[in-house]
Image (cartoon, rainbow, N blue to C red):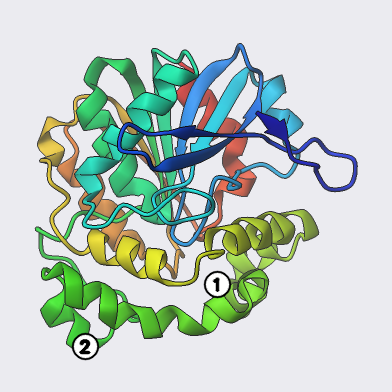
Amino acid sequence: MRERPGHGGRPGPREGSIRLPDGRALAYAEYGDPAGRVVLGCHGSPSSRLERHVEDPEDYRRWGVRFIVPDRPGFGRSDPRPGRRVADWPDDVAPLLDSLGVEEFAVLSLSGGAAYALACAHAFDSRVRSVGVLGGAPPPDVPWPWPGWVPRRLRAAAHRPSPAAALLRPVFAPIAQRPAAIPRYLQARLNPADRRVIGRPEVRRILADTFTEGLRNGTAPLAEDRALLFRPWGFPLTEVRQHVHLWHGTQDWQVPVALGRVLAAMLPRCTAHWLVGEGHFAVFDHAAEVYAALRH
C-alpha cells in the first residue's frame, strides 16, 4: 500500500490494489483511522476510489472512521468486468474486505453508487451494520420519471444491456475531454445550494480529482455503469434488512427528490433525512451527521 500526496499539506489516502480470483485488478483507497469503524464507500458515477465527503481528510481519523473506497470495474485503476451486473459487485468487494481483515462494516453511497451499496447490504447481510444513501434513486423496475439527460431513444433500449451502453457513450464523450472541468460545469448548471458548495476550492479540487481519475479509461466504463442503473439490479429491495439512512436535498437537480422518496418508500427500514433547500452535494455540509449515524 502506498500513500498518495495530499493538497496543501493535508494527508492523501492510502492506496492499494488486489488481484481478484479471476485475475482482474481491484484498486482501492482508504482514509482515516486504520483501527476505526469501517465504512465502505460506493462511489458515484463518474467517480473513483478518490471520492471523499469531507474537505479535511483528518476528520475521518477524528471521528474514528476507516473509510475504504474501491474503484468499480473499469473506473480508475480497476480492470473492467465485461457483462457485469449491479448484483455482481459484492463478489468483487468480498476478497478486498477479506484481504484487509474487515469483518463488520457500514456502507455509504453517493448518487449512482446507491445500487451498489444496497447490493452489498443484501449480499453481506449481518456483516453490514448500517447503510447510508446520499442522493440516490430507486431501481428501474418501478415506475419513476427519467432524468432529462437520458436520450429518448435510450429509454426504449435501457433494458437491453448492449445498446444501452453504446448509446450512452457519445452522450458522455465531451466530459472525458476535460474531466477536471466537470465541477465548474456542475457549478454553472446546478441549484444555488450546490453552486455554493462546489464554489469552495477544496470541494472543487476533490471533485476534479475523483472525476479525472474515474474517467482515466474514457467513457465506456461510465456508459456501462449508467446503463446498469436503468436495468433491474438483481435483488429485491424488500430483502434489505439493515437500517438505511437516506439523505436527499429537496433542491437536488441531479437526482430529483421525488426519486429519493420512491426509494425510501421501498426500503423496509429507512430513516429519510430531507435536507430542505439543499442539493446533490449537501454531504459536504452534513458529513459529521452522516458518519455519526453510520458509526453505530
Q: Residue at 27% of width from left, 38% of height from top?
A: 118
190, above or below 27, in the image: below
Q: Along the horizontal axis of the image, is 194 left or right of 261?
A: right
Q: Are marks 1 and 2 in contact (CB under 8 Å)?
A: no
Foreground pick, 201 / 247: 201
Q: Could you say which is closer to the camera, residue 54 or residue 23?
A: 23
Label 2: how many residues lie within 10 Å, few (<14), some (14-19) or many (20+)? few
Whichever of labels 1 and 2 marks the residue nearer the N terminus, that label is: 2
Counting from the top left corner in percent of width and height, residue 24 is at 39, 43
**Residue 1 visible in the snapshot:** yes
Q: Quadrant of residue 269?
A: top left
Identify the mark at residue 191; answer none if there is no mark: 1
For disc 1, the neighbor class at 10 Å (few under 14, some 14 to 19, many from 20) is: some
Q: Which residue is identified by label 2?
A: 152
Q: Is residue 189 visible?
A: no
Q: Is residue 231 above or below residue 87?
A: below
Q: Residue shown at 41%/48% (left/top)? A: 72
- Give the x, y percent position of residue 221: 39, 63
Q: Please state which amino acid type lies under the numbered disc 2.
A: Arg
Q: Which quarter of the figure has residue 57?
A: top right
